Image: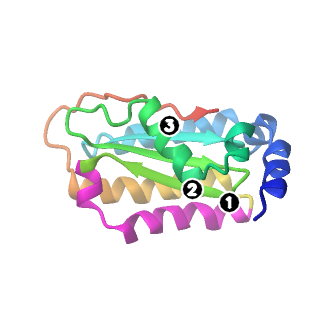
Amino acid sequence: MNTFMRFFRHLRHTRAAARAAFPPATLLAIQACIGAGETQHRAEVRLVIEAALPLGAVLRNESSRARAHELFSHYRIWDTEENSGVLIYLNLADHRVEIVTDRTVGRALKRVDWESVCSTMTRSFADGIYHDGTLEALAQLNRLLALHFPQTSQHKNEISNRPLML
């Protein structure tokens, strides 16, 4: 896609549109789903929703994947005791779901697992079903993480479960 078209697509996608797709009730349900999952596994999950990239990033042709890595670092998702952080990044303007993991989780799960979680979201999002699609994908992710990182003791919540809306 050419940079000019992408620039205007990102310019059109506003925070208001993101809030319409993810209203407060949906954000609370996501937070509860992440919290419930973290009672079953030792990983730390954070969801970040961004309506559009900053326009400077679009002009630099920054990918959603690069932005996800930047946010993974910025919000210190990597800074967990077991190196078990997971960032799910949603870029609504680019219609992208990116998952970035810390090394322990990245070694345990396979690419096909991540692609399946992303596909669950993108299929639902294409139909405008943000609430159920996100919760279904998080439940899928929680099952995978519980399989590889089962809860063994009282796990301290190291990263907020509250989704971030940028």
**Label 2 to label 1, Cα distance in Å?**
10 Å
Q: Nearer the viewer, residue 55 or 83?
A: 55
Q: Residue 65, image x and y in percent?
A: 53, 52
Kindly state the secondary structure of the residue where label 2 is placed.
strand
Disc 1 marks which amino acid? Phe
Considering every residue shown, the one lying at the far left of the view is 152
Q: Which residue is mark 1?
A: 125
User: Going from the N terminus, do you reach mark 1 or mark 3 first?
Assistant: 3
Q: Residue type at mark 2: give it.
A: Val
* Residue 54 visible in this rendered orientation of the protein: no
Front label number (3 vs 2)? 3
Farthest residue, direction front: 60
Residues under numbered marks 2 and 1 in contact, where contact means CB atoms less than 8 Å apart:
yes
Residue under the image location 40 percent in, 37 percent down: 35
The residue indicated by pointer 2 is 97
2 or 1: tag closer to the N-terminus: 2
Of the numbered discs 3 and 2, the one sitting upstream in the chain is 3
In percent of width and height, residue 121 lies at: 58, 60
Callouts 3 and 2 close, C-beta under 8 Å = no
Distance (Cα) linking label 3 and label 2: 13 Å
Quick check: can you spot residue 75?
A: yes
In the image, is 46 to the left or to the right of 79?
A: right
Q: Residue at x 43, y 55 (%)?
A: 139
